[in-house]
Amino acid sequence: MAVTFLGNIDIAQVALYTFWLFFAGLVFYLLKENKREGYPLITGSTGRVTAVGFPAPPAPKTLIPPHGEPVQAPAAVPRQEPPAHYVPSAPFIGAPVEPTGDPMVDGVGPAAYAWRADEPHLAFDDHKPAIQPLRLARDFRIAEEDPDPRGWDVVGADGIIAGVCSEVWVDRTETIVRYLEVEVTATGKRAMVPMPLVRLDEARRQVKVKSVLAEHFAKAPELKSYDRITLREEDRTSAFFASGHLYATPSRMGPVL
């Protein structure tokens, strides 16, 4: 009697089980890779490890960034970050925090920012800073049919003029305006305002920033060089101005009803 080896095998069922095994392995791999940074979790209040979870973080891998020294992830030594200027509002983990200073400057709550590399984001084609002022990005200009805010007054949510828009910064990889550079009247310093947070009033020739008051421009984060903006400076700038929606005035911090 002839012996058959494939007579009782359902090829479709084998393919289905093979796919399930592959998909389960893919999910397991992605879960491990998801923990390459940020683990183990450490509480901000007690400083002790609270969660690693399953699966465990992967073995360290050396990454070579486009600028700077090679880094290991997960890092052997936790990254040093600025001290926290807040206290828990209740004695349990996960309780809301109360700022102890100026939350917009200290980076608390909506003003928090990631401790990213202090290097600029580079364009993929020429490996130069992707975000530059128009005075350096000579291949870019503002279209004639669009308003040019340079020279316009910059007005805070209180209606007071904070300064004058002196420059426009563009993202050369996305061909959009990222920031407006503002000469602050009170201090003479320069502030970078994220473009999504401004409204251009062409009739009054004004740049309106509703998230902050005029006085807040004087304490906005400054750049190390006004020829480029680093990843860390981008996060700090965006967090500062966006947090004004909650922290700019005492009335904004209270309940709506």
Image (cartoon, rainbow, N blue to C red):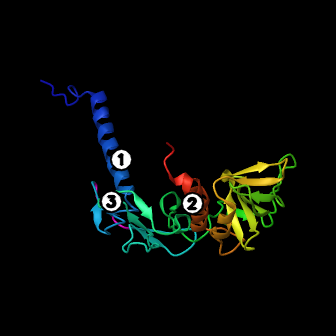
Residue 54, given in percent of the width and then of the height, sits at 27, 54
Residue at screen point 81% across, 66% down: 135
The disc at residue 26 is 1
Query: Residues in magenta?
Result: 55-60
Residue at screen point 32% across, 49% down: 28
Question: Which residue is disc 3 drawn over?
Answer: 90
Residue 126 seen from this side: no
Residue 178 lies in quadrant: bottom right
- Numbered circles on residues, count: 3
Instruction: Name the one closer to the observer, 195 or 133.
Output: 195
Q: CA distance from mark 2 to mark 3?
A: 25 Å
Residue 10 lies in quadrant: top left
Residue 15, given in percent of the width and then of the height, sits at 31, 33
Please name which of the two marks, 1 or 3, marks the residue nearer to the observer: 3
Whether the residues at callouts 1 and 3 have beta carbons within 8 Å, the answer is no
Is 236 contained in the magenta span?
no
Question: Which residue is disc 2 drawn over?
Answer: 239
For mark 1, does the 10 Å Cα neighbourhood hold few (<14), some (14 to 19), or many (20 or more) residues? Answer: few
Q: Amino acid at mark 3?
A: Ala
Asked whether, in this view, residue 8 is left or right of residue 216, the answer is left
Please name which of the two marks, 2 or 3, marks the residue nearer to the observer: 3
Q: Amino acid at mark 1?
A: Leu
